[in-house]
Image (tube, helix red, strand yellow):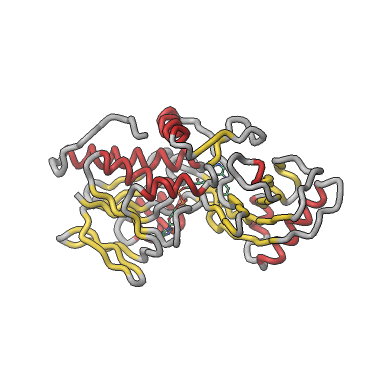
Amino acid sequence: MKVAIVGAGIAGLACAKRLAEHGFEPQLFDKGRRPGGRLSTLELDGDAWDFGAPYFRVSSPRFAVQTAAWEHDGLIARWPTGPEGAWVGVPAMSAIVAAEAAKLPVRFSAQVARIDSDHAGWTVSGPDLREGPFAAVVIAVPCEQAASLLAVHDLAMAQEAASVRSVPCWSVMASFAEPLPSLPDVIREQGPIRWAARNNSKPGRAKAECWVIQSSSEWSRDNIEAEPARVADDLLQALAQISATALPKPVFLKAHRWRFALPLGQRGTPLWNPALQLGACGDWCIGPQIDGAWQSGAELADQIAAALAETGSVQPADQNHGTA
Ligand SMILES: Cc1cc2nc3c(=O)[nH]c(=O)nc-3n(C[C@H](O)[C@H](O)[C@H](O)COP(=O)(O)OP(=O)(O)OC[C@H]3O[C@@H](n4cnc5c(N)ncnc54)[C@H](O)[C@@H]3O)c2cc1C
């Protein structure tokens, strides 16, 4: 049974992987050109910046099983000078999603603008895209974007998505020709800075001095429409104020705006409408982090398998929770 999944971030990938384990045929669509979503890494001439999630922690037993498998495969490692309990992708945060995406059918550069259903099933379409029929559809994109895709078919589900709000965040990437010894590897909540880190202090990175500076929620809201160049200068200036000595001129400086960075107000479960065979998952369903996003996808897959097994549509291949 074919299931279309819109969004190949960690939630969509977890859902696809688990659906495949249950005997379904998932097909992922992502508007990005490469794997990442909010676990993106910019790599340039050997330098790298994890400009989405900088690390993750494990809080659920189920995600702990997946984490152990990633560690076994050399995809993640502890960050010794990072926050307590921090895991990072190796050699980049995006390595985690890239490895998962490589095992699944994903179409990149495939923006889904609408989903439609008729007697044959679901069709997904967008610019240069029209594919179907699928027996079910899963929406695995940030809540604001999910709400608009869901609204045509299930108003209650769209309202659930719309009731969660994402906080924006600016991420500034900077590199320097020399180390900045006056700064610690991690800086938290100082003025407009929510978080800043020396990316090259993570395991498996090149030595060049690369920094990621994330803005606080309040500053991000106040400066959401600011020019990226001005944002980069302002946040670099804020980092310079934390440093005891003047910072050298960066050799690379770029700002990225996450309009939908961190969702607030989760209901605690993924969404599934068995009558329509339409579901939704993502970090806006369970928890605003990688752990929550991953869990939402895996849980939704189990819910879909259980619901369709009840109607006799599929024979579940495997109902256990060993998802690694
Ligand atoms: C700046 C920042 C800092 C963070 N810090 C942390 C942290 O310290 N620890 C932590 O655990 N988490 C952190 N997070 C959160 C973490 O990154 C997210 O919770 C998680 O990656 C969300 O995964 P997801 O699959 O739900 O969504 P996403 O990763 O956003 O994936 C959604 C995917 O859908 C695609 N898409 C969207 N619309 C469409 C469409 N119409 N058609 C096709 N594809 C579409 C996108 O391209 C994207 O790949 C941070 C996030 C940001 C941005």
State left or right for residue 189 relative to residue 290. right
**Residue 127's x, y, as percent?**
36, 71
**Residue 19's x, y, as percent?**
28, 43
Quarter the C terminus occupies: top left
Residue extending furthest left? 312
Q: Nearer the viewer, residue 135 or 161?
A: 135
Residue extending furthest top? 61
**Residue 215's x, y, as percent?**
67, 52
At x 81%, y 54%, the residue is: 247
At x 23%, y 37%, the residue is: 306
Q: Nearer the viewer, residue 32 or 75?
A: 75
**Quarter assignment of residue 56:** top right
At x 41%, y 38%, the residue is: 295
State left or right for residue 253 relative to residue 23. right
182 up-or-down from 250: above or below:
above
State left or right for residue 316 relative to residue 69. left
State left or right for residue 136 relative to residue 282. left
**Residue 249's x, y, as percent?**
79, 60
**Quarter assignment of residue 54:** top right
Residue extending furthest bottom? 128
**Count of marks, rendered view:** 0
Q: Nearer the viewer, residue 148 or 21?
A: 21
At x 63%, y 47%, the residue is: 206
